[in-house]
Each structure stands twice: as C-alpha cells, then as structure tokens.
Amino acid sequence: MSRGAAERVVPTPLVASSHQRRLVSGDRIFGVFAYAAALLILVIAAVFIVALVIPALPAITKFGLGFFVSRTWDAVRNEFGALVPIYGTLVTSAIALLIAFPIGLGAALFLAEDARLRWLRGPLSFLIELLAGIPSVVVGLWAFFILTPLMRDKVDPFLQHSFGFLPLFKGTPTGYGFLTAGLVLAIMVLPIMIALSRDVIRAVPRDLREASLALGATNAETIWSVVLPYARIGITGAVLLSLGRALGETIAVTMVIGNTMQISASLFASGYTLPSVIANEFTEATGNVYLGSLFYLGVVLVLVTIVVNVLARLLIWRFSGAVRAAA
Amino acid sequence: MSLPFVRLMVDRVVGALVVLCVMVAAVPVLVLFLFVIIKGLPGILTPGFFTQPPHPQGVPGGGVLNAIIGTLEIVGIASLLAVPVGALIGIFLSEYGRNQVGDTVRFISDVLTGLPSIAFGIFGYTVVVLTTHHFSALSASIALAVLMLPVILRATETALLLVPNALREAGLALGAPRWRVTLEIVVPAALGGIVTGALLAIARAAGETAPLLFTAFGNDIVQTNPMQPMGALALTVFRNALLPYPNLQEQAWAAALLLVILVAATNILARVYVRRLQR
C-alpha cells in the first residue's frame, strides 16, 4: 500500500473536539489532585523531621554527642544526658525479645505447621489478633494493678531464691522495674512476632517439607533443618519489627518501669526508657534546654526505630522475593 | 519403619513445646480480657458514668462524659482529615503510582507506620500547640490523622489493585475519561477495602494515649470546642490509674472496658462490612 492511501483513511473523531478537550482537562485536574495528595505526605514527612529537630537544637548544640554518654539528668543544673533512658530502653527491649522470640516462634510453628488440634487454630489466631488490637493503655492498666503485685509477691522472690547469686536478681523486688516492663513489652510484641513468622513459615515451599519427610526425617527434624533455615531471613525481619515496636512503646512501659533515672544491674530495679521520659516530663519541662533535651531523646528514638524498621522491611522483602523466585 | 527412640522422643518433645508456646501466648489475652471485664463492669454500671463529668478527687461519684465526648470528637476530626487524603493518596498509588514518586510515597508511609506513637504527639505539639500557644483537641486530631494516614492509604491501594483491569478497560472503551473511570467504577468496586482500612485506622487511633498527652492534654470539664484542651478515654485510664482514690481507679477500669468495647466494635464492624460486600 502506498503512503498516500494510508494518509487518506484518517478516521473522523467519534466525539466533538470541544468535548474531547474537556475530557483531557478533567483528567489533568484529577491527576494534579492525586499528585498533590502524594506530595502532601512528603511534606508531612519533611515537617515531621523539622518539628522534631528544630526544638531539639538548643540541647544538640549544648551537649552534642556527649549527650549519649552522660548519665546526668538534672533539671536544676540544666545538665542532661541520654545514657540512662537508652540503657533502660535496651534492657527492657532485650528482655521482651528474649521472651517473645522463642514463644512467638513456637506459636507460629504451631499455627503454620502443626497438623494436630486443627480446630484450635482459628480461635487462637483470633485471640492473638485481639491482643494486637488492645490499646496499650489498657495493657498498662492491667500490668499496673494485676501484674506488678504478682511479680513483687511471687515471681521476683522465686527468681531471687533460685538465682539470687546473680547480680541480675539482687535488691528488693517492688514489682516495678526492668523485668516487669520487659514482660509487658513481650506480651505486646507477641502478636507481631507470631503473625509475621507464621506468614513467613507458611511461605516456605511445600515441596521442601515433603522432600524432607519423604527422606525419613521427623517433623522436628524437618522444622530444624529445612523450614527454619529457609525462613531465617524472614524470621529475622519479624524479630526486628517486634524490636521496633518494643523500642517505641510508651504508655504501658511508663506505668510499670518505676520512672527513676538510674542504671542498675538488677532487673528488679526501677528505671526509665526513652519514650517514658518524654511522656512523663514533657509537660513539666521548663526552659529551652530541658525541653530541647526531651526533643533530642525523641530524635534518637525516631532515628533508631526508622533504622530498625527499614532493615526489617528489607529482610522481609528479600525473603518474599526469594520465595517468589523459587516458585 | 521404627525410628530410633531418641529421634522419636525429640519429635514428641518439640511437638509438646510448640503447643505449650501457643498456650502461653494465648493466656495473657484471656487473663487480660477477664480482668478488664470483671473490674470494669461495676464502674460502667454506676449511674452517671455516661452522663456526668468527673467529680473532684476524693469526692465519690462522677462519670467520664468529658472523655467520651473528647474521644469521639478528637477521633472524628482526625478521621475527617485523614480518610479523604489517605484515600486520595491510595488512588494515586494504585492508578498513577508505578514510578519513582509512588515508591517514595510507599517508603515514607512504611516509615511512618513504624514510628513510635509518642513521636506523633511531639509532631502535634510542635506544629499546633507551639504555634497557637495552648493545648487543644485539634492538635491531637492532627497528630492522630498523621498516624492514621499510612494505614488508610495502604488499605486503599491494596483494595484498588484488586479491581480487575478489565473493568477499567471497559470504562475507557465506552469513552469515559480516566478520572470518571477511577471515581465511578474503580473506587466503588473497591469501597469495601477502603472502608475497612478507614475503620481499622479509626480503631487504632481511638486507643492511642501517647499522642494525646501533650496535645489534647486532658480536661475534667465537658469541652466541645476543638481549640481547647479536651479529655479522652485513654487519658482517663492513664491518669486515674495512677491516683490513690479507689473510685477513680474503678473509673479507670470502666473507661478501659469502654475503650476496649469501642475498639472491638469498630474492628467487628469492619469485618462484617467486608463479609457483606463479598456476598
């Protein structure tokens, strides 16, 4: 066919050209709205950073990086350091993960793998989801009135009696302190730990399990040498997301940690965490440096949780990527 | 084939441990619910709990009317701010977001999801309280709106992506412009997912305490002006628990029960709505 013939069969437009122009401009307006909304979240993120860092500047310029190694928290002399709350945050989060990791992994294995007691799976999953939805102040209230007396009268004396030779369990148990706060955090991160590891374990290809069982391995051996190694990256991601939650949990911890600016080797001792210092002292802080120090704590907290969360998501993406590649 | 005794035993022990783990994980939930119901019921059944503001410390009686109104108003305003914007960002991500901008928005939204809730309180404090020079319900609403945004936009995106492309193509083939296809075909088809996301975000916001501490601040008087400090159920639970008056502690338990009922009802509503749409 010649080029001339092709040029002659230009179709007549189905709609009038003015109508068509209106269509195009409507699309453009809608697109602008959608882009504007998307940009809004970028603006919010930028404002978030500015809102956190600018008020912290008086403290950042005054204390610099020395803030992280100073144990002083003295409103009278206007000297502040973050070491005590950082220590408290790390200790309580570590206790939480030490408890929640094995229990959460075991529960996830049951919910994802186990062929026994199938009827229990639905109700148990529902219960654990419920726990994730309970407001943290309600968990805090329960811990404050029910758990702390239990710890003071039963659990702490028992630990002291059995392991009292360790510095970890010295001192008078009051029920408030690192151990109770860690336990409360463990309860609060369990739903995340269980739900994420359950999904990760479920994503392990069936063929691998069946191959292992066909070779004569028991269920336990299959879990230990096939399922867990395959799911390792994803489970690490689940642990990190739990850690991110534990580091930032505020209210429930504030109600049971005892709120004392001290570093102690004993887990029965009262302490402080980054979020609970902010929650307790924010409204009474006077002066730029005091308030700025609380903002500085906030900056530290936000930076650490961002790093932990981004790392966790990268690991989980890598895991689901590996699963998709294998499928 | 009989396995060697040790291997069989290890298998049994691991099986038992796994069951033990799931029981240990479930027990705290049951205990918690039991206590909240038992300890909360007497307070909730006290006359005046729903209709009176709190009495001064040490004076028996009084209710949490200030907190009920506060929670509803603070969360209501937050939803009015967050739901339309979140839904619009979700639409952007699903319909226009297969690019660098979309990936950036997704990344930021994920980062916001992981932030500690107290950080949102600091945000509300600096942005609103510092500029208006006093605590207000509005600052709390803005803090909660930012907290809700990621949940809503991700739910919207997921729901919209589930709408089959054939529907979009059918609309476009009939000559409808893209914005009408999106708003009149795609969004209605995905409405269930969007509403569920919004309800879950509302349930989460209603239970938050940390973002309210230095934004809404709390108020024992019934207050409806969003520019003034306002009470909230979560604040009542937190503050009353730490006071040495038995009747106020009872009120804390009752407020906790009410909060749990509110959050659970919103969650159940979301599920029921999804079920009904699926039929």
Image: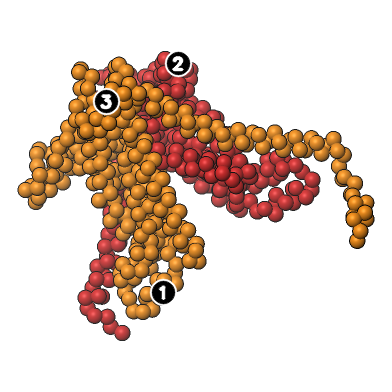
**Taking A258 as reference, is A59 left or right?**
right
The tint chain A carries is orange
- Front-lying residue, B229 or A225: A225
Residue at 10% from the left image edge and 38% from the top image edge: A172
- Left or right of residue B169, residue A49 in this image: left
Mark 1, secondary structure of its residue: helix
Q: Position of residue B93 (x, y in %)?
A: 58, 43
Chain containing mark 2: B
Query: Which x, y percent locates residue B247?
Result: 27, 26
Q: Which quadrant is home to the N terminus of chain A?
A: bottom right
Residue B28, percent across and down?
29, 48
Report whether residue B32 is seen.
Answer: no
Query: Can residue B210 be spotted in the picture?
Result: yes
| Residue B166 as seen in the image, left or right of residue A59 | right
Q: Residue A201 appears in which quarter of the rendering? A: bottom left
Mark 1 belongs to which amino acid?
Answer: Glu
How many C-alpha atoms fall within 10 Å of the one at disc 1: few (<14), some, or many (≥20)? few
**Residue B132, numbered label:** 2
Mark 3 lies on a secondary structure that is helix
Residue A16 lies in what quarter of the image?
Answer: top right
Q: CA distance from mark 1 to mark 2?
A: 65 Å
Q: Secondary structure at mark 2?
A: helix
- Residue hosting label 3: A63
Q: Nearer the viewer, residue B160 or B232?
A: B160
Residue reaching furthest to the top: B133
Whether the residues at callouts 1 and 2 have beta carbons within 8 Å, the answer is no
Residue plotted at (75% across, 42% down): B177
Q: Nearer the viewer, residue A190 or B220?
A: A190
